[in-house]
Image (spheres, rainbow, N blue to C red):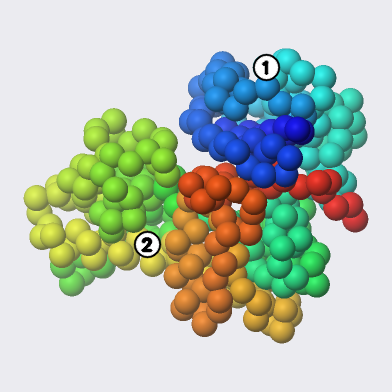
Amino acid sequence: MTAIIGWDIGGAHIKAARADDGRLTAVVQIACAPHEGVASLEQALRDGRAALGVADRHRVTMTAELSDAFESRARGVATVASIAMREMGVPDIVFYAGDRGLITRDEIGANVDAVASANWRASAELVARRCADALFIDIGSTTTDLAPICAGRVVALGASDTARLACGELAYAGFSRGAPQAYARRAPVAGSWTPLVNEAFASMADVRRVLGDLAEGETEADLSPTADGRPKTIAASRARLARLIGRDAAELADAQHRALAEFFARAQLRVIEDQIALCESRDARAFDAPIVGAGAGRKLAARLAQALGRAFVDFGDLIAAPPALRDKAAVCAPAAALALLPEPRRA
């Protein structure tokens, strides 16, 4: 039996998936905060290893190099790779470099830009092996990745974050992290437009909780602490959102609280819709294909597909895994893809 563990080392979470003989057998997601010290990253890797056990091979992708713990992305890539090598303590570890495939630690120096934030490509490559034509959308906790797939190939224009932001293939619009005021400068309240307070009073997790997309106390899709340290309840989320409009929660009726949350949710969704439109503007004929959704916010991708009149396919339904693991695998798509890909395709 061959055991492969795929790792997606991020700036807020470490996600890992184990595959035994090409079938997923375990998936974990662990919160970390490298910006507070790399010890957080090291401990999360240790916890992941303890949860997934011994494996024959380890494959690593990352986005943690963007953390302000590192003075540059290049230094971040090198540091994260070194930490991974040390904490995993095994010789058979390789790093994902996008369309360049899997490379060794010694090759990272010449491939820093290809290794940095390439996790989206691993997921898209797996989807391309299952769907000849698709628009892959991964709505994670922090960002949304979009990757067009045509004739069984990933045809994304961008590789770096800079290029992907410019061509509509990356949006800082996530399911739970990020500030609601990133998507709007004002909100309708009691019949008037109210400018928003530009402070870190609330997160998109509060929006989801008020709307029922996150249950009270749920941590699976919301591992980050709340903005004020108070509980993950609907009442506390309402209070945090009310501060964005300079009010106390008691000043708004139940319907007004929901209307405010819905406004923020729609404003964020419009950002993603705009990125889809930008992608489609390159060749609209290529975007009649189904939307394949992954990430903690893939239900939002399903709603977008319905609104656009397109079929929707859940990433979890494309992989070999027990039904109970498919949801976790879809949330941790890059890690699952790395564990399952026989060998990433090369350009």
Query: Front-most of 204 and 73?
Result: 204
Residue highlighted by disc 2: 265
Q: Is residue 335 visible?
A: no
Select label 1 or label 2 by which is in front. Answer: 1
Hey, what amino acid is under mark 2? Ala
* Residue 265 spot, x, y in % from top left: 37, 62
Instruction: Name above or below for residue 229 compared with residue 215.
Output: above
Query: Front-most of 315 and 267?
Result: 315
* Residue 159 spot, x, y in % from top left: 77, 53
Residue at position x 52%, y 80% in the image:
308
- In space, the residues marked 1 and 2 are separated at their CA atoms by 39 Å
Query: Front-most of 291 and 182?
Result: 291
Q: Is residue 302 visible?
A: yes
Task: Kindly indicate the quadrant of the structure image that contains residue 292.
Answer: bottom right
Q: How many marks?
A: 2
Task: Kindly indicate the quadrant of the structure image that contains residue 290.
Answer: bottom right
Residue at position x 77%, y 18% in the image:
90
Q: Mark 2, residues whose alpha carbon is within 10 Å: few (<14), some, or many (≥20)?
A: some
* Residue 183 spot, x, y in % from top left: 43, 59
Hey, what amino acid is under mark 1? Glu
Residue highlighted by disc 1: 87
Q: Residue furthest front?
A: 1
Q: Earlier in the sequence, mark 1 or mark 2?
A: 1
Instruction: Name above or below for residue 61 compared with residue 132.
Output: above
